[in-house]
Amino acid sequence: MAYADQQMSGNKITALVIVALIHVFAGYALVTGLAYEAAKKVISKVTTVDIKEEKPKEEEPPPPPPKQEEAPPPPIVAPPPPINIAPAPPPVQTVITPPPAPPVVIPTAAPPPPPPPAPSKAQGVSPKGQNRWAERIQANYPTRAAREGREGRVGVRVTINSEGRVAGCSVTSSSGSPDLDEAACEGMSRYARFNPALDAAGNPTSGTYSTAIVYRLN
């Protein structure tokens, strides 16, 4: 195939060269005055040359590849049945728990006992110079009761302030004579003197005192 192509190409080139030379020659003949007829004959001979192209030989198709024999399919192998292997049981660990330790008791010091309470200084009202002021009260015997010869005993209760003076008086037991009862409270308020009552801390405070005034004629 390649050789035929090269031969055909060489023939074409030769023909082309010949045609070119003929044209050059014809031109030259015309210029130099050569006979027109001679040139015409040459040109007709040359131009009538048939160039036959050789057909390239057809290459024979390659033979078909040999048929491959089909390999027989591999035999079907069934997988073996799964084997269940039971896992080994976990080891049993025996844990021995020691008995709990007894609680630790930390002895605490007992709180000190509270200090004993201070002794109370409280005290009640007490008369001061009772004989003297009692005589003065009896010396002020009511005039009308003395003239009428009336005697009697008057029970009184007086309130004593923190200065030891009578701040109030009330009759707790009447003598039966209003003037004797009135004279008893009036005499207590004017003449009686007392030591005031004391609280637990020993401070003077108010208190009460009860007594009796006896009116008797000589």
Image (tube, rainbow, N blue to C red):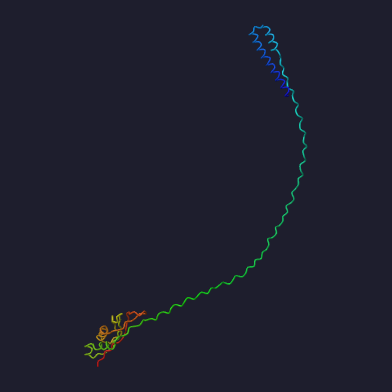
Q: Is 21 or 11 nearer to us in this picture?
A: 21
Q: From the top left corner, tell me how far across and down residue 46 is, in percent.
A: 70, 12
Q: From the top left corner, tell me how far across and down residue 107 is, in percent.
A: 52, 74
**Quadrant in the picture for residue 48:** top right
Q: Is 89 or 145 nearer to us in this picture?
A: 89
| Numbered disc total | 0
Vertical comparison of 12 with 206: above or below = above
Question: Image check: 75 left or right of 177?
Answer: right
Quadrant position of the C terminus in the picture = bottom left
Vertical comparison of 108 with 14: above or below = below
**Quadrant in the picture for residue 2:** top right
Q: From the top left corner, tell me how far across and down residue 38 is, in percent.
A: 68, 7
View extreme (front): residue: 32
Quadrant position of the N terminus in the picture = top right
Question: Image check: 150 left or right of 121?
Answer: left
Q: From the top left corner, tell me how far across and down residue 131 is, in percent.
A: 28, 89
View extreme (bottom): residue: 218
Vertical comparison of 176 with 86: above or below = below
Q: Is 40 or 97 nearer to us in this picture?
A: 40
